Image: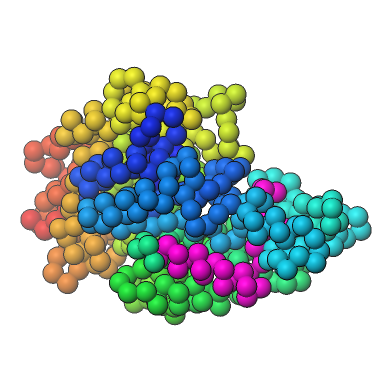
Amino acid sequence: MIYQIYPRSFADSDGDGIGDLAGIRSRLHHLRWLGVDGIWLSPIYPSPMADFGYDVADHTDVDGTFGDLDGFDALLAEAHDADLRVLLDWVPNHTSDQHPWFVESRSSRKSPRRDWYVWRDGRNGGPPNNWLAAFGGRAWALDERTTQWYLHLFLPEQPDLNWSNPDVERAMHEVLRFWLDRGVDGFRADVVHLIGKDPDLPDLPEHLAHLDLVGIHDHPGTHELLRGIRRVLDSYPGERAMVGEVNLGSPALLAPYYGAGDELHLVFNFSLLRAPWDARRWAELITESEAAIPAEGAWPVWVLSNHDRPRHRSRYGGSEARARLAAMVLLTLRGTPFLYAGEELGLLDAVVPAAAQVDPGGRDGCRAPLPWSPGPGHGWGSTEPWLPWPPNPEDWNAETLRADEHSILHLYRDLLAARRRSPALREGRFRLLEAPQGVLAYERTGQTDTRRVVANFSDLPVDVGSLAVRDWAVEVATRRPPTASWDGTLGPAEGVTLKPA
Ligand code: ISL
């Protein structure tokens, strides 16, 4: 299980209201106690923060807001001592417009780095093609001085790199080596499916022209680039992994990004993150994913929340019961679950008043700071962090939840412990079970053990006794305290993980 840390919002060591690396170090014990295997840090590099770090101005240093390289080395060493792997965010598709590469590239049409980015002449006085940017507007900006347009699939402050230039490929491999040499265990690769592009940059057909490229771009040229990236990782000792963000619609479109075991190690599957609260829909998506990413081939990834979407508890109408049930499913499916910091605390999105909004993508709510304790400052040493607290931090904070063994935090911990104990939950095969309406049920079978998960998504109590009473005992229940002897009914939004009696 990998735990995503959004460094600005995780923990603050110096009271400036922005999280930092020393803050993360001071909270590693929380992750160890919870049962995390590894952490992924959203970008920590020097950045003008137009997209809060996804606009990288220097790939091989740490932004002063977060600390410095020595602080990073210390964090890495402490994480490794605590048996935690460390993945960094690698942003290969674009840089900041303040990156020296781009400053040089835009300086003149003759610049030796001109071709490091995607420059084109305009068409009929307008941009070179009809592409749109992810944060609104067209995907091209005109550089007045050199009278050419550059491509930016995100903000104008995030020009796209030109990966068809071998010098760019080499330079970005060097970035990987810089951090691999320091000992990192791998990377989460930001929108990595965007790096291969048709050099003709053709218009999108009219029926797609209202969409930005992020959800639809699927160019075959990317795969050769991924194999090159994989070779860099494979040249290092130990296990180094690359998990790629590939934002394509259906699980079937993700499978090719694993290659023949020679591209990405893991590919995010956002199908549940995008799904409504509906047992049948979840069953369909899980079945589709199982078919697309079969046990013999690759290893799936599951995720319900991240720094780009409203938190899942907020998406499910704020219900704690649903958040608990979702956690049970997330942590018992076949694959590697990714947790977004704070979901183990059952956090809701913060309500961010218009005047306090800072993200160009409207994603501030899910990026609210994590409350660590009750009382002023909630462990941040500052009463005014960079974004408002999530709702009711007096109750919804790590310290208070940890003191209550029936809290959602303990449920996450118990589920992770159950996963660690059971080869079936860790690596067993997956089989969907027939279940009453509104119920998602499945079995996981390993070499030596079996588990069943029965999850009632509906708002009514359901009798699932035929699936689950005889021969089965409750191992983990989302309801706390669990009823002493289970009678085979599940209340609204309740679930159980069962083991053979
Ligand atoms: O944020 C989104 C929707 O709310 C997505 O469309 C997002 O832009 C997409 O998932 C790509 O995300 C990644 O790259 C972006 C960065 O802003 C995101 O934070 C990152 O996760 C550009 O680097």
x and y percent of residue 463 in the render?
23, 44
Q: Residue at x 44, y 42 (%)?
A: 66
- Classify the position of the C terminus by image quarter: bottom left
Highlighted range, magenta: 151-180
**Left or right: 343 as drawn, with respect to 100:** left
Residue 466: horizontal and vertical position, in percent? 19, 53
Q: Is residue 212 visible?
A: no
Q: Is residue 33 left or right of residue 211?
A: left
Q: Is residue 465 above or below residue 217?
A: above
Residue at 65% x, 60% y: name it: 101
Q: Residue at position x 41%, y 33% from top?
A: 369
Q: Position of residue 7 (x, y in %)?
A: 42, 43
User: On the image, which quarter does residue 26 sit in?
Assistant: top left
**Most extreme residue toward the bottom, as rendered?**
260
Q: Give the farthest residue toward the top.
A: 376
Q: Nearer the viewer, residue 341 or 416?
A: 341
Res 86 visible: yes
Q: Name the residue rendered at 31%, 62% in the picture.
A: 334
Residue 173 included in the magenta stretch of the image: yes
User: In which quadrant of the rendered view does residue 184 lie?
Assistant: bottom left
Report x, y in % for residue 154.
65, 51
Image quadrant occupied by the N terminus: bottom left
Nearest the eye: 373 or 67: 67
Residue 203 in magenta? no
